[in-house]
Image (spheres, rainbow, N blue to C red):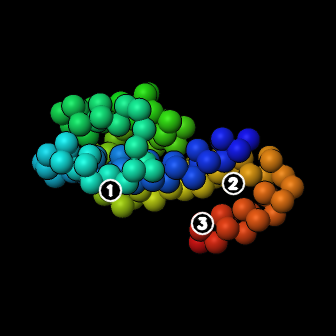
Amino acid sequence: PLATFLDFITYEYMIANVLKLISGAKAGRETLDLLYKCHPLGLFEGIGALTAASSADDMYEIVLIDSPLGQFFQRTEKKDFDEFSMEYIRSNLHKNYLEHFYDFCRDLGGETWTVMSEILDFEAD
């Protein structure tokens, strides 16, 4: 459980890094340069593959299938990447992340649930 809990801590940074790369690709910026500006806690095996993607759609496929963040992208449709702003996508993913983290902490119970439920409730607001 501790390893999973710590994974959840890093997922927020991973989401931020992936969205930074996607927004850079949508804006036509060089994704390799953006990769160097990513937060170190949000780096994961396979994030480099995102720099090889030629479009936001390609990045969506890579992230959905090959990353630890796939569980948060399941409720985000591919069309969302084209039709909605990055802020909308960010808030959707952050909501999915918080719901998963909340459920995980609730299932752990005990002192973890007591402390984290307040923190996650605050973060969700």
Q: Give the CA separation, mark 1 to mark 2.
A: 24 Å
Check disc 2 and give the amino acid type. Tyr
Considering only vertical position in the picture, is 42 above or below 70?
A: below
Regarding residue 2, the answer to whether it shows in the image is yes
Helix or strand or loop: what does disc 1 sit on? helix
Query: To which residue does mark 3 refer?
Result: 124
Q: Quadrant of residue 39?
A: bottom left
Nearer-N-terminus badge (1/2): 1
Q: Amino acid at mark 1?
A: Met
Comparing 93 with 75, the one in front is: 93
Q: Which callout, 1 or 3, points at the residue further toward the start of the chain?
A: 1
Q: Residue at 72%, 69% (x, y): give it.
A: 118
Q: Which residue has dot 2 on it? A: 102
Mark drawn on residue 86: 1
Q: Quadrant of the N terminus?
A: top right
Q: Position of residue 40 (x, y in %)?
A: 39, 50
Residue 113 in which image quadrant? bottom right
For marks 2 and 3 on the same chain, the one whose residue lies earlier in the sequence? 2
Asked if marks 2 and 3 touch (Cβ < 8 Å), the reply is yes
* Residue 69 percent coordinates (x, y): 48, 40
- Please count the marks in the image: 3
Would you call the spot at circle 2 few (<14 residues within 10 Å), some (14-19), or many (20 or more)?
many
Q: How far is the residue under mark 2 from the one under mark 3?
A: 10 Å
Query: Residue 118 versus residue 112: which sits nearer the camera?
Result: 112
Q: Say few, some or many: other residues with alpha carbon within 10 Å of mark 3 (under 14 / 14 to 19 / 20 or more).
A: few
